[in-house]
Image: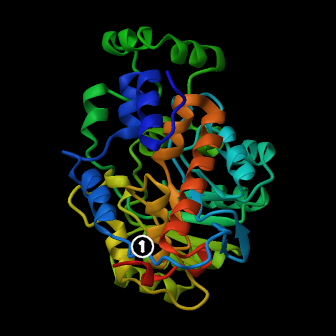
């Protein structure tokens, strides 16, 4: 099989490598998956108005996030249970992010712990927080601070889990349910199965501590169920408790973004969780197109981004960076850590190519003037 080139190629290669239940867990969305399709359609509707006869002999994809220079406007976003794709996935993603000069955001639902990932990478690490309960959340925040994570990302769109019907049909869960169907699927994907057996089946790395190890909390994390009573006063308390940069991710309304900024949040992320929560919600890039941030504050976006040109569109609309979730996992499933390196290099090349073709050689100069 030829080496993958595009995200679509890596997705196809990952689909061949992974058992169906695992691939569907990564690839799927809520309900009939209309939200997944809508995210792509919204990005594709945005059109450039290229401006030729400009000096584009040198291109620069770098941007600045929270005072740090990043090589391109990407954050490798938080994903749950990446170890189900490849053993050591979180460590591989963190190392690849460091080499590419972009941040890596570790999920509460990661397969490796806060401390293990810090030991594997001295890059810019962010920690994504699900508030399963207040005591555990406090402990995770303290651990992230002690491990020198620069940014805390609070995800707020998972009061209950989305209706992800692919996972329900497949019986996907942790630990893996060794049904006859899943056992057969594993047998048809021997490279994946052997790797998992040799390295140990995936688990929630941040729930190994005494205060986090009960099965109820692990089930809640599997379903992405945060404390449903968590509200604005709790966000204020978190802002007071966390001394570094704070991002709130999962917003889908401009008034909520404004209120976050009023509380003192440093950045907000427009996100519909990749279409995995509320199926019939707007595409986040449409909200980004309507948004403004106070001076010194930052906008992020995710959901549906597959190409470097997509990322250029987001930056031109005001985002500092795009969180990528499924894309790195496709690369990881296809070709392991090398695949993630390749994917990030491909995206950077496509970003730079797009910058040249639209007549704006520096990503930091992008604005809405690049659109038709």
Identify which residue, 367 or 180, lies in the foreground. Answer: 367
Residue 233 versus residue 313 in the image, above or below: below
Query: Which residue is tagged 1?
Result: 231
Q: Is residue 306 left or right of residue 363?
A: left
Quarter of the view holding residue 348: bottom right
Tell me which residue sits at (51%, 25%) in the image: 2
Please identify the quadrant where the C terminus is shown. Answer: bottom left
Q: Dot 1: few (<14), some (14–19), or many (≥20) neighbours within 10 Å?
A: few
Q: Is residue 280 left or right of residue 221?
A: left
Tell me which residue sits at (26%, 67%) in the image: 282
Residue 161's spot in the image, x, y percent?
Answer: 33, 49
Q: Is residue 171 left or right of residue 360?
A: left
**One can see residue 81 in this view:** no
Residue 279's spot in the image, x, y percent?
Answer: 23, 55
Residue 228 versus residue 234 in the image, above or below: above
Identify which residue, 135 or 105, lies in the foreground. Answer: 105
Residue 121's spot in the image, x, y percent?
Answer: 78, 47
Q: Which residue is farthest front?
A: 53
Tell me which residue sits at (69%, 45%) in the image: 96
Q: Is residue 148 left or right of residue 252?
A: right
Local secondary structure at mark 1: loop
Quarter of the view holding residue 86: top right
Identify which residue, 296 or 38, lies in the foreground. Answer: 38
Count of marks, rendered view: 1
**Rendering colour mode:** rainbow
**One can see residue 349 in this view:** yes
Residue 369's spot in the image, x, y percent?
Answer: 43, 84
Residue 46 versus residue 99 in the image, above or below: below
Tell me which residue sits at (64%, 37%) in the image: 208
């Amino acid at each position: 099989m030829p080496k993958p080139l595009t995200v679509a190629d890596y997705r196809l290669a990952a689909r061949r490598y992974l058992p169906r239940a695992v691939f569907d867990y990564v690839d799927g969305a809520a309900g009939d998956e209309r939200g997944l399709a809508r995210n792509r359609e919204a990005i594709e509707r945005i059109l450039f108005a290229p401006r030729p006869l400009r000096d584009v002999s040198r291109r620069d994809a770098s941007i600045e996030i929270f005072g740090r220079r990043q090589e391109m406007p990407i954050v490798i976003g938080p994903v749950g249970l990446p170890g189900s794709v490849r053993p050591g996935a979180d460590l591989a993603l963190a190392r690849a992010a460091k080499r590419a000069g972009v941040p890596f955001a570790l999920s509460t639902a990661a397969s490796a712990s806060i401390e293990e990932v810090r030991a594997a990478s001295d890059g810019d690490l962010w920690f994504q927080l699900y508030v399963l309960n207040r005591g555990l959340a406090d402990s995770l925040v303290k651990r992230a601070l002690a491990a020198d994570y620069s940014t805390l990302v609070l995800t707020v769109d998972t009061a209950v889990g989305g209706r992800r019907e692919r996972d329900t049909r497949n019986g996907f869960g942790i630990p893996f349910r060794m049904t006859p169907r899943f056992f057969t699927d594993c047998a048809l994907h021997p490279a994946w199965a052997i790797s998992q057996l040799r390295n140990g089946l995936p688990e929630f790395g941040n729930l190994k501590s005494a205060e986090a190890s009960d099965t109820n909390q692990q089930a809640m994390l599997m379903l992405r169920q945060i404390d449903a009573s968590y509200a604005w006063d709790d966000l204020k308390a978190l802002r007071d408790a966390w001394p570094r940069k704070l991002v709130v991710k999962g917003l889908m309304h401009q008034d909520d973004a404004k209120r976050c900024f009023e509380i003192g949040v440093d950045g907000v992320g427009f996100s519909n969780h990749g279409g995995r929560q509320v199926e019939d919600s707007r595409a986040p890039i449409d909200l980004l197109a309507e948004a403004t941030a106070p001076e010194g504050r930052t906008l992020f976006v995710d959901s549906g981004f597959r190409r470097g040109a997509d990322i250029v569109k987001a930056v031109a609309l005001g985002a500092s960076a795009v969180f990528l979730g499924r894309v790195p996992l496709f690369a990881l499933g296809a070709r392991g850590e090398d695949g993630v390196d390749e994917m990030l290099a491909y995206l950077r090349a496509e970003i730079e190519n797009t910058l040249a073709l639209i007549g704006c050689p520096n990503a930091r100069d992008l604005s809405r003037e690049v659109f038709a």
